[in-house]
Amino acid sequence: MPAKPFFVLAIRVDKLTNSLELASTGESFVTTLTRLTAKDAGALTGKWVFNWQREARQRGREMYQLTTVQQPGVVQGLLSVERKSDHVFMHLVEVAGSNRGANRVYRGVLGNLVAFACKLSFESKFEGFVAFDAKTKLITHYKNVLGATQIGNLRMVIETEPASTLVLTYFKDFFLNPSSHE
């Protein structure tokens, strides 16, 4: 019997933007992705669905926090990935509560986090390959918006071409200087 997935991606991508976009005005904000330590996870404020302290204890996982340059202390989204032998696996992805629903503050959080996972894959010489498990009702959405391909019941993969598109959307200069990520 196959193991149940630890996490199922269940967030609708609101919009692919070139940074974070203030939902009320469309104004763009430059983002920063930094490592989230176990100490940082313990200090998270706001309503988070996943237990990031527990995630911090998982062996082999790397966690990242997305903030804007203007508000570096306010976490807009979180990502937990694992570098496998030939791809990056997204275990957890979460958008801050303030960025969900009709009254969200920013658009583009999930796209930014997924693009970052693709960037990590390129940096790791995995050709942009990223895998994750999705909720059934969002599989078509992820195919259309992220260019993901379904390879199992819930398992999806983002291959090189759509990964390149995502990386170029959020990290425009990434492919201009390949030696900087060797």
Image (spheres, rainbow, N blue to C red):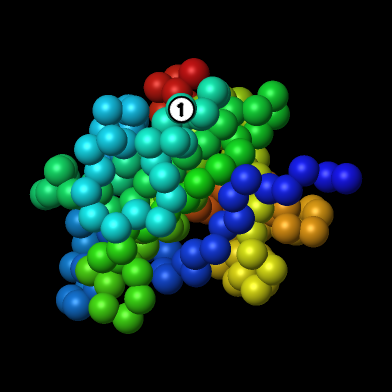
Q: Which of 181 and 153 lies nearest the eye of the viewer? A: 153
Mark 1, residue position? 57
Residue 59, position as x, y percentages in the image:
54, 23
Quadrant containing the N terminus is: top right
Which residue ends up furthest to the bottom in the rendered image?
A: 102
Residue 103, position as x, y percentages in the image:
26, 78
Above or below, comparing residue 92 to residue 122 in the picture:
below
Q: Badge 1, how many Cα within 10 Å: few under 14, some, many 20+?
A: few
> Image quadrant of residue 39?
top left
- Taking the image as shown, residue 157 lies to the left or right of residue 51, namely right
- Taking the image as shown, residue 42 lies to the left or right of residue 181, namely left
Residue 24, position as x, y percentages in the image:
19, 77
For the point 60% across and 35% down, the residue is 88
Q: Which of 7 and 70 lies nearest the eye of the viewer? A: 7
> Image quadrant of residue 176?
top left
For the point 25% across and 43% down, the residue is 44
